[in-house]
Amino acid sequence: MANASATAITQRLIQFNTINPPGDEQDCTRHLGAMLESAGFEINYFEYDERRTSLIARLAGRGTKPPFCFGGHVDVVPLGLAPWSVEPFAAKVEDGKLFGRGSSDMKSGVAAFVHAGLRLAQTEERAADVVLLIVAGEETGCDGSKHVAELGVLPECGAVVIAEPTSNYPYLGHRGALWLEGTVTGRTAHGSMPELGENAVYKAARAVTKLEDFGFNERPDPLLGSTTLNVGTFEGGININSVPDRAKFTIDIRTIPGRDHAATVMELGQYLGPEVELTTKVDVVPVLTDAEDPWVQETFTLLEPVLGEQPEPRGAPYFTDASALTPACGNPPTLIMGPGEMAQAHQSDEFCVVDRIEEAAELYHAMARRWCGLL
Ligand SMILES: [Zn+2]
């Protein structure tokens, strides 16, 4: 398996059904762990729930330089309501594209850095460790990466690459996410006598309407823009002829650096008043690396001939495991960069361009070699 191409490794990973929920990443993670272990990596598995397996693989180097780190998740999103014209787990290649759930988001990225790690393991004189963080449960809010972060088992790293889909363009960070659920209670009564009840839907509707006018008092981030708020779902009542005694809605807030999540929940709670009970469903912080960081600049230079231009500083639209992993690795400079196509993430007939996968494997290998003093 050590000589398999990055594309072949991706194909094997797609064949593991890791749709989250329920996730069930164990077999996929252990498959990767076995490959890496036989190449000389030290392997540790971590489970935050039954069969929800994450993995830390470490290839020891000789020097005192902090490790170079790659990170990615092996869970994938459900197939969605739109029908697929290809079998989502067959991992077929057609016209230079590899089709399958997770091909872009992000089994190709994981396969590419595993491939780079396997090659690197064949070199003797590495001046630093290389660490691969392969986690479960990203798609539901970074559960796997939060788990390993909270265990305190992550090493202080010198640089981190998160292999989420960017067509191999380096992104400097992304906004955070704060997902809240608002619950409103009332008192039920027969629909013919509403004056005897207290309608929770009316109360919730007032709260949601108020949210449309909520303003975040802040200065926009030059790269990541502003904090935004969206009400994603609203539900209430169980039948037409009863006064609803319960209504719920969900709020998706995307935050920029400098915004404190706990303070934001407090502020919204005060704004909506005591009728609305807010609970936090997902809480992942923003991540942003300085474009002037020497490693970032070095990487931009390395990427220039591949991209055909000097990369410009950009932020990614989605959040990633970097929210949990980067702080737990000592806040090293972090780039989001992987072979998948951003627009293919979570789509029916998801694909990844085969050449991009092999390109990512080459780039990751070059980045890690450089860090380890081999270039
Ligand atoms: Zn992803």
Image: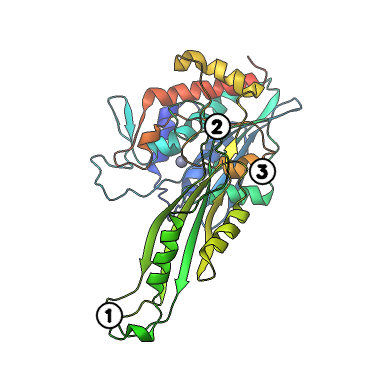
The answer to whether mark 3 and mark 2 are in CB contact below 8 A is no
Q: Is mark 1 within 8 Å of ligand 1?
A: no
Q: Earlier in the sequence, mark 2 or mark 1?
A: 2
Q: Position of residue 106 (x, y in %)?
A: 44, 37
Evaluate whether residue 168 shows in this view.
yes
Residue at image mark 3: 328
Q: CA distance from mark 3 to mark 1?
A: 52 Å
Evaluate whether residue 248 shows in this view.
no
Relative to 119, does residue 18 appear above or below in the rendering? below
Q: Earlier in the sequence, mark 3 or mark 2?
A: 2
Q: Residue 222's mark?
A: 2
Q: Secondary structure at mark 2?
A: loop
Q: CA distance from mark 2 to mark 1?
A: 52 Å
Q: Position of residue 367 (x, y in %)?
A: 58, 22
Q: Quadrant of residue 12?
A: top left
Dot 3 alpha-carbon crowd within 10 angstroms: few under 14, some 14 to 19, many 20 or more: many
Q: Of discs 3 and 1, which sits in the foreground? A: 1
Q: Secondary structure at mark 1?
A: loop
Residue at image mark 1: 241
Q: Earlier in the sequence, mark 3 or mark 1?
A: 1
Q: Position of residue 261 (x, y in %)?
A: 60, 52
Residue nearer the viewer, 309 or 119: 309
Q: Position of residue 255 (x, y in %)?
A: 54, 45
Q: At 27% across and 80% down in the image, what residue appears?
A: 241
Instruction: Check disc 2 and give the amino acid type.
Output: Pro
